Image (cartoon, rainbow, N blue to C red):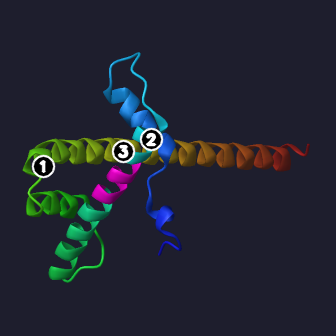
Amino acid sequence: MAEKLEDLNLPLTVVTRIVKEALPSGVSISKEARTGLAKAASVFVLYVTSAATNIVRNKKRKALTGQDVIDAMKDIEFDRFVEPLGEALEHYKTMASARKSASMKKKDEQEDTEVIEDDWILLRLEFKMYSGA
């Protein structure tokens, strides 16, 4: 749990980067506005997290999932975010699956290479033993 209330705030640099991406280039944001946006975003995240946690408790589960967050958005009547969040969640799952598949393929290739190298070492040792070298 957070020791201070400020520990619950989202990092100002991250919020600033997101805001700058959303605004047209050349628009500057005052420090007070950035701080206010960061606090508002933090409160929103805590509110959604609380609603999602209630869903998890009602279902007698311990782990909070992306679908719980989407369901919480419906419960707190932020319906306009449900579809984009669902699409983002599916995209994330697709990307994670692709990364996992690539990692498994790389691991399999690495194991195959290690087996070939081990076989090559054994072959050389056997050759030395039989050739008397």
- Give residue 18's quadrant in the image: top left
Circle 3 sits on which residue?
A: 37
| First along the sequence among labels 2 and 1 | 2
Q: Is mark 3 on a helix, strand or loop?
A: helix
Q: Are marks 2 and 1 in contact (CB under 8 Å)?
A: no
Q: How far apart are marks 3 and 2 (CA)?
A: 9 Å
Q: Are marks 3 and 2 in contact (CB under 8 Å)?
A: no
Farthest residue to the bottom: give it.
Answer: 60
Residue type at mark 1 is Val
Q: Give the range drawn in magenta.
A: 37-44
Q: How far apart are marks 2 and 1 (CA)?
A: 30 Å
Q: Specify whether residue 38 is painted magenta.
A: yes
Circle 1 sits on which residue?
A: 82
| First along the sequence among labels 3 and 1 | 3
- Give residue 57's quadrant in the image: bottom left
Q: Name the residue at 36% across, 56% down.
A: 42
Q: Which of 54 and 101 is in front in this view?
A: 54
Q: Name the residue at 16% across, 63% down.
A: 72
Residue 114 x %, y %: 62, 47
Dot 1 alpha-carbon crowd within 10 angstroms: few under 14, some 14 to 19, many 20 or more = some
Q: Nearer the viewer, mark 3 or mark 1?
A: 3
Q: Specify whether residue 45 is painted magenta.
A: no
Q: Is mark 1 on a helix, strand or loop?
A: helix
Residue type at mark 3 is Leu
Is 6 placed left or right of 59 in the picture? right
Q: Name the residue at 12% across, 49% down.
A: 82
Q: Nearer the viewer, residue 74 or 106?
A: 74
Residue 111 x %, y %: 55, 49
Q: Name the residue at 77% across, 43% down.
A: 124
Circle 2 sits on which residue?
A: 32
Q: Residue 91 bears which disc, if any?
A: none
